[in-house]
């Protein structure tokens, strides 16, 4: 990964260059703290807190006037993915026109609308050229934003990635382009904030949050990471909105949100069976005793697949003529199978496989069957902790990862299958960071409500707030840190357990009462 503060992360899929690059993009935005740009240089991040101006605010009437997601009664039956695809296609066409204009007259090259939108989505809100941004959105992007809004209102989103057999070679160009749609929505929301229109700003923030959840709804981890990135960007807009005078406390909108906001189960279940999708031949290991020809075909397929996993090449088609390299890879696989054959056959027999069947199997079948069974056991030692609360399981997951690496050293064939095992700890941190952002914002909004009800005074402690629920840090299951000094307070949480020592893995707000 490109960001230095992610150097603790293993490659989520070490050999899938396409997936790794896209995950880097998703994580880059996902780790950005609200009110900060997406990429923070290590040397400038320091320990400077994010300053938040607090305007005392009552809750809206009715209390649930604002919601972070469309209510069921607002939703329309249909597939949101259709509308997002339409928006992406229109965006690409517009980009092509602008690129053509610059090519025709390089001397007068101008920033493309995409580049301008990207800049305005992240720069301090006070520096956005208000009228210029409004004109650009109206003239170039109104139709695109309409498609995004239509998609966000749909009751379901099906990208139809289930049951695809492409595996890591499945192209996901729409995932990167949807991040460009999110930036458009963010600029739209920020302009509404600048106009002092909280209802309009919340409408677009809700659209963006809904799109993020739609994007994340699928069996591919990169979808979830891009969805997290989108919703993190919307959280930046929320933090700007709550600092705008006249914005009511959004504490109940935040308290009423789904938790977790993006459920990891769907995407992580898809990743759990990525190996079987890439190597469907594995399902034949247990069906019958192979003939010599079947064993040879399996070894050929294995060396073709595993070679492309660890290279820059596209998949090698069956029937491709052999060369010296393929012969060497086949010989290497045969050597590894021979090294573990005795242990593998004894293990299969000990676990109930008929001895006569095991002895009749080719060496490659015995070795791969044993390795595959070991792989599934070790894989579930990791995955069983995924849906356990983070504070109860982050260290257990780390231990499971280390155990898997240790076992890889004992069986030389395990690393071949382990190439398609994502770094679950790293991915899981992204889910927790998003919920941590939401909870920190909920605490801030509870504080704003308290100051409204207590003559502009900050609460002496979080326990003193009784007007609304004050959540605990979802990463530690402990209260957020809170200290008051005159008209300022700090809201904090430590480094995400298991995470790197970087400010984006902490909560560090300096709350200042508006004067």
Image (cartoon, rainbow, N blue to C red):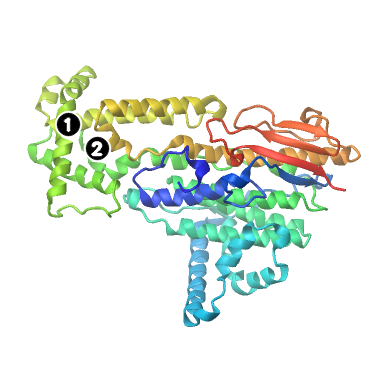
Q: Is residue 431 left or right of residue 378?
A: right
* Residue at the extreme bottom of the image, as rendered: 104
Residue linked to disc 1: 337
Q: Is residue 227 above or below residue 416?
A: below
Residue sitting at the far front: 43
Q: Secondary structure at mark 2?
A: helix
At x 58% / y 58%, what residue is drawn?
182
Q: Give the side of residue 132 with respect to residue 321, left or right.
A: right
Q: Position of residue 137 (x, y in %)?
A: 64, 69
Q: Which quarter of the figure has residue 452? A: top right
What residue sits right under mark 2 in the picture? 283
Rendered location of residue 268, percent (x, y):
44, 39
State whether residue 240 is above or below residue 83. above
Q: Is residue 77 left or right of residue 170?
A: right
Residue at point 53% right, 34% down?
499
Q: Secondary structure at mark 1?
A: helix
Q: Is residue 485 above or below residue 196?
A: above
Residue 10 in percent (x, y) is at 42, 39
Going 17% across and 42% down the picture, which residue do you hit? 329
Q: In terms of depth relative to the viewer, which is nearer, 64 or 396? A: 396
Disc 1: CA contacts within 10 A as few (<14), some (14-19) or many (>=20): many
Q: Is residue 515 visible?
A: yes
- The residue sitting at 74% across, 58% down in the picture is 193
Residue 69 seen by the camera: no
Sooner in the amino-acid sequence: mark 2 or mark 1: 2
């Amino acid at each position: 990964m490109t960001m230095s503060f992610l150097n603790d992360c293993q490659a989520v899929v070490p050999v899938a260059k396409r997936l790794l690059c896209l995950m880097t993009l998703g994580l880059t935005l996902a780790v950005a703290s609200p009110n900060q740009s997406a990429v923070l240089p290590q040397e400038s991040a320091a320990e400077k807190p994010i300053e938040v101006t607090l305007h005392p605010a009552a809750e809206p009437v009715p209390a649930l006037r604002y919601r972070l997601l469309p209510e069921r009664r607002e939703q329309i039956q249909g597939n949101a993915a259709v509308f997002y695809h339409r928006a992406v296609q229109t965006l690409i066409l517009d980009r092509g026109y602008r690129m053509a204009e610059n090519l025709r007259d390089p001397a007068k090259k101008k920033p493309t609308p995409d580049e301008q939108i990207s800049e305005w989505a992240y720069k301090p809100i006070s520096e956005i050229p208000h009228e210029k941004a409004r004109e650009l959105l109206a003239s170039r992007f109104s139709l695109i934003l309409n498609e995004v809004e239509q998609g966000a209102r749909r009751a379901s989103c099906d990208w139809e990635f289930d049951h695809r057999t492409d595996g890591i070679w499945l192209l996901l160009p729409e995932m990167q382009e949807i991040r460009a749609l999110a930036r458009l929505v963010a600029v739209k929301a920020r302009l509404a904030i600048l106009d002092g229109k909280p209802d309009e700003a919340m409408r677009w923030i809700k659209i963006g949050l809904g799109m993020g959840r739609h994007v994340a709804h699928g069996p591919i981890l990169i979808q979830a990471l891009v969805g997290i990135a989108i919703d993190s960007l919307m959280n930046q807009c929320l933090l700007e909105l709550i600092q705008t005078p006249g914005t009511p406390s959004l504490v109940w909108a935040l308290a009423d949100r789904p938790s977790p906001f993006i459920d990891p189960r769907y995407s992580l279940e898809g990743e759990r069976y990525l190996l079987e999708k890439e190597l469907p031949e594995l399902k034949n290991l247990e069906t019958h005793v192979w003939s010599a020809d079947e064993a040879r075909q399996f070894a050929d397929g294995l060396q073709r697949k595993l070679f492309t996993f660890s290279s820059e090449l596209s998949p090698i088609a069956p029937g491709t003529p052999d060369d010296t390299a393929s012969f060497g890879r086949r010989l290497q696989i045969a050597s590894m199978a021979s090294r573990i054959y005795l242990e593998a056959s004894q293990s299969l027999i000990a676990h109930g496989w008929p001895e006569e069947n095991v002895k009749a199997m080719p060496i490659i079948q015995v070795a791969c069957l044993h390795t595959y069974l070991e792989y599934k056991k070790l894989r579930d030692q990791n995955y069983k902790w995924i849906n356990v609360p983070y504070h109860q399981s982050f260290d257990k997951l780390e231990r499971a990862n280390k155990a898997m690496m240790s076992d890889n050293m004992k069986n030389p064939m395990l690393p071949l299958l382990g190439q398609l095992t994502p770094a679950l700890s790293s991915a899981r941190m992204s889910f927790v960071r998003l919920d941590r952002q939401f909870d920190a914002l909920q605490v801030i909004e509870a504080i704003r409500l308290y100051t409204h009800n207590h003559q502009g005074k900050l609460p002496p402690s979080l326990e003193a707030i009784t007007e609304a629920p004050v959540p605990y840090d979802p990463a530690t299951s402990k209260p957020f840190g809170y200290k008051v000094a005159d008209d300022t307070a700090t809201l904090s949480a430590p480094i995400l357990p298991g995470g790197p020592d970087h400010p984006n893995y902490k909560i560090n707000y300096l709350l200042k009462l508006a004067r």
